[in-house]
Image: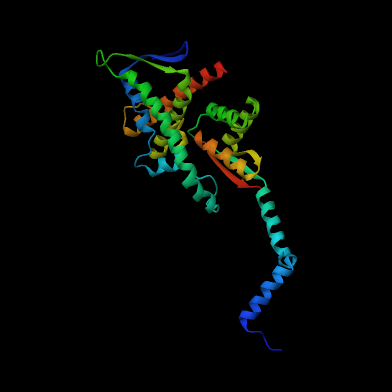
Amino acid sequence: MEICRQDQALEIRELDPFLAELLRQVPESAQPKDSPAAEERLFSAPAAPEEKDLCAEWKVYVVPELRRLFQSATETVRQDLEQLQCTGKPFANCTLRIPLAHTDAWLSALNQARLAIAATYQFSDHELCDHYRSPLGSRRDLSLFQVNFYGFLQEFILREIEGNS
Amino acid sequence: MSRLPWKQEAKFAATVIIDFPDATLEAPTIEKKEATEQQIEMPWNVVVHNDPVNLMSYVTMVFQRVFGYPRERAEKHMLEVHHSGRSILWSGLRERAELYVQQLHGYLLLATIEKTV
């Protein structure tokens, strides 16, 4: 896999089918679905529980706005990922172009996915620092790899944004 | 002294209020209002809490964007969050503090508002 800046886009080239599949899972992974832990993390409380009025108002007025914001980001990412629809050989490497205008959406969606997965699997600090664990052991190992791979992409996008500003 | 029947008493009271409007402005009501304003103006802190998933570079970028802090200051707060578990990013009026917390939640940081002690 090779990532580079190409005009007004970031290009991920030579993306092998396994990593391409992980990328395809970004929008899906960003949804808390049936995980209360993920829901709680993505929509955390704005104050201590004693501030009952504030927390209640937050749920009514702010959480729906945040939900829309997050969904808008994952929708942009979903559209970019349509480039990964295999039209040629089924196991061929492919290229993904992320327009610079979409980098904020990608940062958000990758972050949503990382936080939701980490909350669902309750990864420890130690596990999250283990960048060399094989993704092949179990679903948990694969999810940890997913969190780290998405983090790697976030780092790259951030570097490019900083270089741009 | 005998009391007036209740209807007459009420009529008399109403007359007093109309004839002497100043008498209806009770001092305690005004004091209560002042106390509420004081409460609203009491500074609130915007606190960001540590979480092991958000990247350090990402948190720094968010602080720069939301608060307009220069990189050095944003990094100082990010490191405080990382090492101490929390950092006070801003203090001031409640409404503004709530707005900052909303923005920080939009970037998926763990942020809360707290009354200053």
Relative image position of residue B103 (x, y in whole percent): 54, 36
Number of on-image labels: 0
Q: Is residue B47 above or below residue A13?
A: below
The quadrant of the image that shows the C terminus of chain A is top right
The residue drawn where x is 53% and y is 28% is B58
- Drawn side of residue A53 relative to residue A86, left or right: right
The residue drawn where x is 65% and y is 44% is B93
Nearest to the observer: residue A83 or residue B11: B11
Relative image position of residue B43 (x, y in whole percent): 67, 46
> Which quadrant of the view contains residue A124?
top left
**Residue A3 seen anywhere in this rendered image of the structure:** yes
Relative image position of residue A155 (x, y in whole percent): 49, 23
Nearest to the observer: residue A127 or residue A42: A42
Q: Residue furthest bottom?
A: B1
- Drawn side of residue B111 relative to residue A109, left or right: right
The quadrant of the image that shows the N terminus of chain A is top left
